[in-house]
Image (spheres, rainbow, N blue to C red):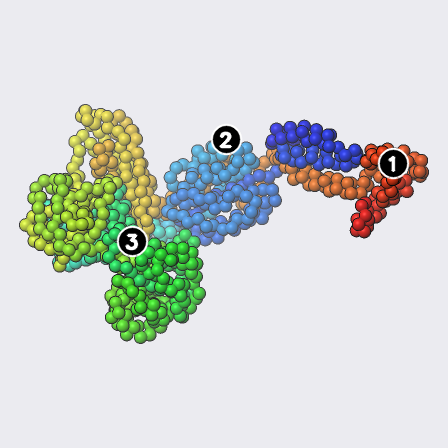
Amino acid sequence: MIEIVRPVLLLLLLPLLGGLWLLRSGRFWLDLLHGLTLLLVVLALSEPSLRLKRRGGTVVVVADRSASMPSDAPARLESLIRTAEARRRASDLIGVVSFGSHAAIEHPVQNLPFGGFSAAHNPDASNLAEALESALSLIPHKAAARLLVLSDGNFSGADPRPLAALAASRSIAIDYRRLTRETVGDLAIERIEAPQQIRPGEALLATAWINSPVARTLGYRLQRGSTLVAEGTREVPRGRSPLIFRDLPADDAGTVLGYRLSITADEGDPLPENNQARFIVSLAGVRPLLCLTAAPGSQLPANLSSSGHRVTTLQPHQLSGRLEDLAGFSGVVIENTRADLIGDQALQLLAAWIEHAGAGLLMTGGRNSFGMGGYYRSPLESLLPVSLELRREHRKLSLAIMVVLDRSGSMTASVAGGRTKMDLANLGTVEVLRQLSDYDSMGVLAVDTKAHSIFDLTPVGQLRAAESRILAIQSMGGGIYVYEALKAAVAQLVTADTGAKHILLFADASDSEEPGDYKNLLAKATAAGLTVSVIGLGKPTDSDAELLLDIARRGDGRCFFTDNALEVPRLFAQDTFMVARNTWVTNSVVPQFTAALSELSPHLPPAAPALGGYNLAYLQPSATAIAISPDENAAPLVALRRYGSGRTAAFLGEADGAESGSFARWQHSASFYAALAEYCAGARDHERAGVLIQQQPIPGGVRVAVHLDLNQPELRGLSNLSANVLRHRPGETPEHSQVTLGWQSADQLAAEIALTGSETLLASVVFPDGRTTSLPPVCLPYSPEFTPAGTGDGAALLASLAQISGGTALADVGEIWQRLPRTHRPLALAVWLYLLAALLFLGSVFERHTGWFSLRRRHRASGPSPDRESVAPETAARSRTTSSPLPESGPPVPSTPSDAADSPAAATESPLARAKRRARQQTQGNPP
């Protein structure tokens, strides 16, 4: 059966054939070839296909990349896919979908070979349902196809069986090959029963259920943070048995307690990952404020605590970077502390916690705060009530800066996103260029064993189009010779006529060589007004870190270390901002309070003593200014802002220090800081009348439920409740989502929230009026991928998927191609029609130049021995038809070689001989 995709194009035959009739040449074979050529082209354009019943189609492989798979699973999965590919026919198509916590399309459906796994997965979950849905979406409607699942059958999240029913409705069978790890003899902590919250002074009672395949003696160890709670050995029987623990936390233990239990046995354990479990317990009551300060002995924490809130003071490096630790506080105060001392990951976590968990932020000023402290373009900048850029009209000095880049062999290492360390250093250099004004100057050196000038010190106005040259810098191997780098940079800067001169050195903290006599060089440089900052790629403990620290110290600059190459562009921008845009105003200024002072506190007087200085910033459109400077800047000195479900406040003067001015000795200063503390901490969590919020553990997650007393009229119409959900794994970027609470009964709204692996989840219920109620942080004991389960569970699921869809278990995955059904598959004819049309077109060209088909026709018409009389009438008729009329008078027209061609003698001439004769005549200048 022939099908035509675009039958409307067949209408083109009417004008084309009509045109051929009008423009016919009178030569039968030539007109026939032209007509057939056009007919085939039109047929090809209409895309006809011949439907033949053949075996073949599409196979989509669904590959499990979760942690529950065997340790050698990636290699085994690729081997199985290659085995299947080897048996594929040329017309068959293959696709690959992999999955962990989410599904990813590794290889779109095509006939090209699979190139290997490239998607990054969170292996702490097995979202098989999403993977099956993605695989089905790759298969065209009504296409012959099968799915091949390569998995252990364990899944988390949605049940995949409904997807098997969907596949069956599309006649797509699900085959499988099960890959399993060894679990015989697995000793495991099956679950831990502990309250999520206890009252202060109350003892904790927790029960751990141990699943042991044999009776044995096991060791156990329970820790609360770094504090050992219990340790010993215990005889356990075969099967499940409880271990009961009791702990009475000290008053200074904190408001969120993290516990970790580990068990050990003499015999080998095939799955040690489930021998350790953690759980979190929170203390009920008012949560304290966290104050981060780099200045020991600061009086700010004492002033803040005068509000009645407890204040916990930490040095920046003591911040753990774990969500459960932050969840124990109501807000954070950052006092004159540089951003790099806190770290980018901790800043990201702080920003997410404030925005989505309803926490507060207060930042106080100084030379190490706001823009001067490196918060420009940091994760916290967008939350603050003030913006940190320095507008052009406030620039006081021009700057000459030399950026010196390490381009040694270590810079070729790859980082996330498919880039190299060199690429990120180039991006950082571009950030420097973008922050400078046209009246600044900039130069770039790339250094290995010597300094290579990318461009010398040049006015920035002439370098705006030079970004491509910077981005093209490549690593050339070798190491970085520090002395050569500094010497070349100093040589260009010493003659610069600018207000500030600066060197920014980027180097590997473990591969910086040949420092030479850098001490004398830097002494001369600083005497000439130069400063030197260093960005070290690595850790402060690396082999060359002390050298880089000493260079920055002797160069009166700053030294930044990071082992996360993705932070490099931000550090380049931070150092440039701190050098080129000094935003600390040293003039003494008396704060001018606005009418919004009552929003902060109705008890503060409207006048205050002068500040010794302040950080110049600009009020955000959505913020409220409580006090402004009466100078020409009219800058905000105190500002408040609601951001997300949290609150932020900024006091741009120095709270406690040499430049705090007489404001620090103001008799109402304690009340002022107490009011800021009250704003930062937010409303204290009190139970709302008629509302009960519960968070209950369920397998693989938690259930958040809100119970309403509908006897209270104001609660009857309460709806649109949601939960802000913040997830975090140490060392990773926090994730946020919002879950709607649906009606489960007449007086209850609830939602179930899944948990994965090592993440900590912090939920808060959001009411329609914007108020939030924070819930205790929760976590799973360990990744659900290591949960002990019956050995037949995964096998039963895979068998169920195959039974529902009509598939089977495959010992040889290559057989799947033979199991594809025989279906009517279209065979496209267009390409063959185009090819035949091309051949006919060549035939028409041949006929037009040789007349071979016409001569053959004459031969057949005249018989085997044509004579002059038999061909003369035809020749005469053609001569009469094609020749021009003779003039009425004049000399006779001489005959031409073409007449000779039409003579009876030429009628017996072979077409090839005739063509050669005409070519010779054209070469000799005679018409054919």
Inter-mark Cα distance, 2 to 3: 50 Å
Q: Which residue is mark 2?
A: 169
At label 2, counting other C-alpha atoms closer than 10 Å, the crowd grade (few under 14, some 14-19, many 20 or more) is few
* Sequence-earlier tag: 2 or 3: 2
Quadrant placement of the N terminus:
top right
First reached walking from the N terminus: tag 2 or tag 1 = 2
Relative height, residue 575 to residue 640 (above, below)? below
In-image side of 348 versus 463 (left or right): left
- The answer to whether one can see residue 112 in this image is yes
Residue drawn at (14%, 42%) of the image: 594
**Closer to the camera in the image, 522 or 820:** 522
Element carrying mark 1: helix
Camera-near label (2 vs 1) is 1
Q: Nearer the viewer, residue 762 or 203?
A: 762
Residue type at numbered disc 1: Thr
Q: Is residue 738 left or right of residue 40?
A: left
Tally of numbered discs: 3
Residue named by callout 3: 344
Indicate the amino acid at tag 3. Answer: Asp
The percent position of residue 231, horizontal first and vertical second, equals 24, 55
